[in-house]
Amino acid sequence: MQFLSDNAAAVHPRVWDAMRAADAADRPYDGDALSQRLDEAFGALFGREVAVMWVATGTAANCLALATMVPPHGGVVCHREAHVEMDEGGAPGFYLHGAKLLLADGEGAKLTPESVAAVLGAIRDDVHQVQPHALTLTQASEYGLSYRPAELAALVALARERGLMVHMDGARFANAAAFLGQSAAETCGDVDALSFGCVKNGGMSAEAVVFFAPELAAVARYRRKRAGHLQSKGRFLAAQLLAMIEGDLWLENARAANAAAAEIAHAAPGRLLQPVEANEVFLTLDEAERDALRAQGFGFYDWGPGAARFVAGWDTRQDDARALARAVAAL
Amino acid sequence: MQFLSDNAAAVHPRVWDAMRAADAADRPYDGDALSQRLDEAFGALFGREVAVMWVATGTAANCLALATMVPPHGGVVCHREAHVEMDEGGAPGFYLHGAKLLLADGEGAKLTPESVAAVLGAIRDDVHQVQPHALTLTQASEYGLSYRPAELAALVALARERGLMVHMDGARFANAAAFLGQSAAETCGDVDALSFGCVKNGGMSAEAVVFFAPELAAVARYRRKRAGHLQSKGRFLAAQLLAMIEGDLWLENARAANAAAAEIAHAAPGRLLQPVEANEVFLTLDEAERDALRAQGFGFYDWGPGAARFVAGWDTRQDDARALARAVAAL
Amino acid sequence: MQFLSDNAAAVHPRVWDAMRAADAADRPYDGDALSQRLDEAFGALFGREVAVMWVATGTAANCLALATMVPPHGGVVCHREAHVEMDEGGAPGFYLHGAKLLLADGEGAKLTPESVAAVLGAIRDDVHQVQPHALTLTQASEYGLSYRPAELAALVALARERGLMVHMDGARFANAAAFLGQSAAETCGDVDALSFGCVKNGGMSAEAVVFFAPELAAVARYRRKRAGHLQSKGRFLAAQLLAMIEGDLWLENARAANAAAAEIAHAAPGRLLQPVEANEVFLTLDEAERDALRAQGFGFYDWGPGAARFVAGWDTRQDDARALARAVAAL
Amino acid sequence: MQFLSDNAAAVHPRVWDAMRAADAADRPYDGDALSQRLDEAFGALFGREVAVMWVATGTAANCLALATMVPPHGGVVCHREAHVEMDEGGAPGFYLHGAKLLLADGEGAKLTPESVAAVLGAIRDDVHQVQPHALTLTQASEYGLSYRPAELAALVALARERGLMVHMDGARFANAAAFLGQSAAETCGDVDALSFGCVKNGGMSAEAVVFFAPELAAVARYRRKRAGHLQSKGRFLAAQLLAMIEGDLWLENARAANAAAAEIAHAAPGRLLQPVEANEVFLTLDEAERDALRAQGFGFYDWGPGAARFVAGWDTRQDDARALARAVAAL
């Protein structure tokens, strides 16, 4: 019973079906019929014109999006525990040619206007310090918290005021939308580009970069090729993305994962390090407790010395979640 | 009846089967059982110890390999018409941080010791000129020619003498091996790293970078993550690669493609721009002739004003190749 | 009697005087009074508004200028024998983050609309090939030829038509202006930025980047600091530049160097590889002839197997030039 | 009476003399006689074999040194308030191709084995996190504190144990040596490369990068050219460096600056934010006090809301320091 991560889950049957249906040769790269449908399909989902680009990983999605916003001599404000800072192996430094991540604080890996303003305010406006050009935030956050529309609006407003573009890392965007019970547009707010996650949510190898500022997409297409991310059989990535958003599979899968996480959370409200607003649960658990759970067959990561992280996937069985909930309650 | 390229062909059924068999969640990234088998499986294929890394595209494979050989201030000798120079959207400049491609001549996009030595000899050994650190060659070449073992040995010997590492772009490596009737090891020679193509040969989205110098692989793994090419469900890429080399599917598919190409070539020996030593056929065809073929339903690319390129894939039907051969002969 | 290069000549007394006069501490970097005068002084020289930035070398000047025009995924058209391609140790790859030099032909290292158009025409407008964003040309060229106004106008018109910005490498700009008997503005044409050389013309360690498009300068100032080229005692660089343009010292020095070169050229019209339109003389001279000249104490570089290059500096004594002229005539 | 910085002070007369003496043309770049003497002269100073390279700025010196130690996918441990992090306009990101600065704490901008170990210990040894390859520390620190030999030894030992190379930013190295009353070798410890400052200490435009690991220098020479820092009249930079170390001018100047700083410090021991161990003095001063000092003609920078920084240069007159001391004491 694995709660290690949602990042290696099985592929959803409807995604498999869509991929198989895409087998027949079509034009290479993103010239195929499916890739050509992405703008329209995502446009319908977000209720506005968008330009959409597939890539294989969230790291590539985030970095290609940011590379359109930030010159090599610029900086990006992000949370101190953001994925771009912590877990992308320095990919932003590579894709942005040495541009700098400017680290802000905030509870639960969420930025606030105050924490962002503190970072911005500390930067002298001269050539000796790296100037900010963009802001990136993660929805849901690295601690499984979801930004509310008003929070997004305040952050975006601050960014606009300072001339920053805004990117959203949506590796678990579906989980936030499902938790908030909101549309894609509301969950996203008025950002310039969104990394729309699919791999953690039942996909195999496709994420969407959704550009709300179409001129950015034109640049990103060159950058994608230049980064070796333009696959010749791109139709298989497009097929995954379309399968995910058609019939609201993205929400259906996210709801299942969120429900499993909620099941666990409800069993141990006193142990929660963070409210559970997506599919991740952080619990205070000492070493003996963690050992006890592992002895019962539960897999998960330690989170520092006195806590653990449990992640539910689209395919986490509700029975397994219930078993874990019971085991935690019984500690 | 398409002869445009092999790069968007269907996925081979055995590859599909292997991918489906890999569906169950395993450890993420390359910690899964299939990824862990790659070194051994490819080691058996090449008859020596190797370290193997999957990536999604040939561009990424080439550039990650070269990035382990060449510092940012260095250069790579390649053919003037090499894929890295012509068709990778500047990816070498990105991955190698501005290192320079040093362009050599040679018939049929094949390098020779003379053409490489000419490039090397023109470089002053001082800090004002970019110094060569590696050599990259393509097997089969961009014009569908295959290097013979003695040719490879001569190039590698020259490279060693000048202190250069050697990379082979094997986007169509299988076609060369099949044409030459040689083992993988013979087809490859004593290079330091090989981009072993799979996508053009019945795969979906996986190429192998085969490192014969294992210390390079250690660096390349960091670079792969940093480039956003470390997929979390990497097992699906490993599955493709294993399916391809197990039971010699790579050779079987390449032989089929080569046979189709040979069929076409035999129909028009007088029109051949290059000998056909893989799955590509370059024919002199004037505009009227090309129009006539297209009117009969054949798809292909023009190759300059007076010629055309025809590429056969693993799934090109022999009937279609025969039909094309007849049509060409009848012009 | 050295004719090796103008790049290591003595510093002109008026430049020394200006530097000494700048000794008293002033605001650091480019906040000092002299640096603040540059825009106005060069604006007067060029008869239009400009933004000027000092840097220590021509390589830095060229690359910082180009870095404002070309994104990392773009390309720059230059002559195959341009300094940026041949002799800057890969600096454009560094400063432009892997952007590509797109090499054009042309007699005497001069570009023509035809040779540039040939390069542009060969680039497919898709993401697989690096797209051009700028054009750079050298005035006087690497072979000492000067572009006439109509030639410049035709090149700039072509660049504009294709959406390219234009940079001029003016390491020997003064020599061109002096040869043509033209104003700075005429010698430069309607380019977007000029590397105005000073070191080869009696300066010590300062070149000016002159931006005719002021928005480029704003970016370049960040890039200069980021490249470690913002000296804290920048007043000493500004002093050199001001000394050079005030009282037309730049033209006076260039005329002296050109006159020495002309003296040599007139002695051997039949040996000239190129017309002499600046301060460089390329002569066909076999090995024995070169040995003979060296035995008489003349220093110069071989230029391939059957020729030699002679460069005159601002401080080349007319007597020395005459002696060389006689020696060549006597061969 | 300026105490703003030492970075724009006048040039020492002996430096001027050395530069004038270098006027006659010599071989370009670093082929001149003076540049060729650097290794020996600095070798004598440090009592061991070294390879020395001039550059124009401390930023270039630091970044070129680090670029020889850290691959693009690696990281450098530095203090959170180090000059490379705070005041180099992102130059490390540029020169190290996106390598990451890993920020450590420590009083007075000094690293400790504990603070460095804390940073190293928090990095997972996997490809998702940037791995450390080097450590850089500043002697004297950005707050004017000097590392003692035992402190250096402990840091270097830790670095070696973890496989890190070590760089020292010695923008004010002379001030540390003068304060500690130690030799250059003792002040430096067993680092791999040192940025030996000269500009802040009476030079005009030259810093020395001193490589104790000679194989690094070979790489750095290519990188220097590639960064546009190889000046053709390099003899003028070498002249400055030689003037500075010959006859111990570097120590003489640093002692003068330190004495002036000590004078100020002694006047207000209760106001010192940091001990004064070089030529910088940080004093708690409220706004009214700062205004009062400025009204008396003293120039200095605010240091946050309740403090100010005073820097003495080699040319700060002892009378001025005494006047400031009296004025502070009288507040």
Image (spheres, coloured by chain):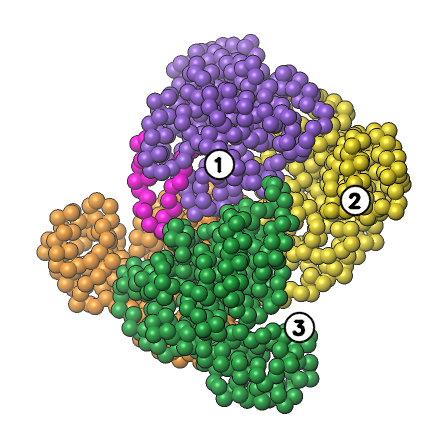
Chain colours: A green, B orange, C purple, D yellow
User: Which residue occupies the foreground of this view, D33 or A143?
Assistant: A143
1 and 2 marks in contact (CB < 8 Å): no
The dot on residue B30 is none
C288 vs C65, nearest the viewer: C65
Q: Position of residue B220 (x, y in %)?
A: 52, 60
Same chain? Circles 1 and 2 = no
Say if D185 sits above or below B203 in the image.
Answer: above
Disc 1 residue crowd, few under 14, some 14–19, many 20+, Cα 10 Å: many
* Callout 2 secondary element: loop
Residue B24, x across and y down, in percent: 44, 80
- Real-space CA distance between mark 1 and mark 2, rounded to the nearest whole angstrom: 41 Å
Q: Nearer the viewer, mark 1 or mark 2?
A: 2
Residue D277 included in the magenta stretch of the image = no
Q: Chain of mark 1?
A: C
What residue do we see at 51% from left, 63% from top? A150
User: Callout 3: 10 Å neighbours few (<14), some, many (20+)?
Assistant: few
- Quarter of the image for residue D10 reads top right
The magenta stretch spans residue C123: yes
How many marks the image carries: the answer is 3
What x and y, as percent, mark residue D170? Answer: 74, 43
Magenta-colored span: C113-136
Q: Which residue is mark 1?
A: C216
As drawn, the label of residue D286 is 2
Q: Which label sits on residue A304?
A: 3
